[in-house]
Amino acid sequence: QALQDKEAGYRQLVELSPDLMSIQIEGQIALINPAGAEMLGVQNPEQLLGRPWLDFVHPVYREVADQRLQQVLEKGVEISAEEKWIRPDGKVLDVEVRARPVICQGKSAVRIAARDVTARKRAEGALQESEERHRRLLELYLDSIGVETARTAELQAALRRAEEGDRLKSQLLSMVSHELRTPLTSIRGQTSTLLDYGDQVGP
């Protein structure tokens, strides 16, 4: 009676679990709860009994998933993994899976617990895309700042060159003016003397 009560309690726990709970015997589904059937897109859990478990694993993950299940059975270890499953309607699910060995109906079996994380994966992907988009925008912004900084530096350098040119031109004009002023003064003095002398001498 105690064993029956324990089994009944276990079945009730499995039935009420929000995650997929299933037992696989010789590669086929021997038991699956309503939440698991709903996850796989089937209304009645009994429709899944006897179906090969790997039918619901995405073809890309099927070989690896089969190797994991064999490892669970042969080594008696529990394995956790992330896989992609595919429902009969073609919808692909991202799933976290835990598998451990059990004895069911006197045979070696695998108990599988799985949770649909498709929504979480999509949210993580959207977050990564958003972060990547913001990173690219930041890089473009920093690049534009760099271009503007370079342009500003070029303009400042051109302005300094122009100012230096004006200074040199002013310096050159000052020197030329000074150098010309001395001989012109001498010439003007001599011209005045000649004119004065000419007036004294007469024609």
Image (tube, grey):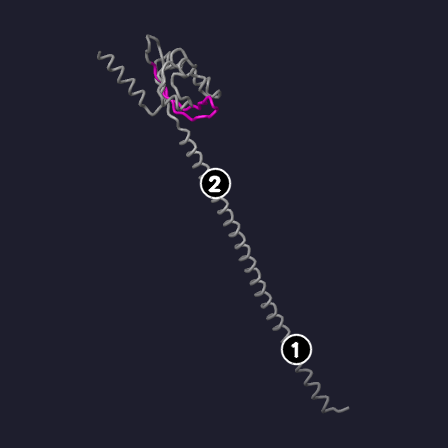
Residue 85 in percent (x, y) is at: 44, 23
Please state which of residues 150 and 106 is positioned toward the viewer in this rendering. 106
Q: Is residue 4 magenta?
A: no
- Location of the C terminus (image quadrant): bottom right
Q: Which residue is at the front of the view, 12 or 86?
A: 12
Specify the amino acid type for callout 2.
Answer: Arg
Would residue 93 be counted in the magenta stretch? Answer: yes
Q: Nearer the viewer, mark 1 or mark 2?
A: 2
Q: Which residues are magenta?
A: 79-101
Left or right of 161 on screen, residue 6: left
Q: Residue at x 41, y 13 (%)?
A: 50
Residue at 71% x, 85% y: name it.
194
Asked if the residue at tag 2 contacts the one at tag 1, i.e. Cβ–Cβ closer than 8 Å, the answer is: no
Which residue: 38% across, 18% down?
Answer: 45
According to the image, label 2 marks what residue? 133
Q: Residue furthest front?
A: 44
Q: Position of residue 186 (x, y in %)?
A: 65, 79
Looking at the image, the residue that sits furthest to the right is 203
Residue 131 sits in quarter:
top left
Q: In the drawing, does residue 184 fall left or right of residue 43?
A: right
Q: Which sits in the foreground, 5 or 57?
A: 5
Q: Identify the secondary structure beneath mark 1.
A: helix
In this rendering, the answer to whether 144 lies above or below 119 is below
Indicate the secondary structure of the residue bearing disc 2.
helix
Disc 1 designates what residue?
184
Horizontally, is 151 left or right of 15 in the view? right
Image quadrant occupied by the N terminus = top left
Kindly indicate the quadrant of the structure image that contains residue 97.
top left
Across and down, in percent, residue 74 comes to 37, 11
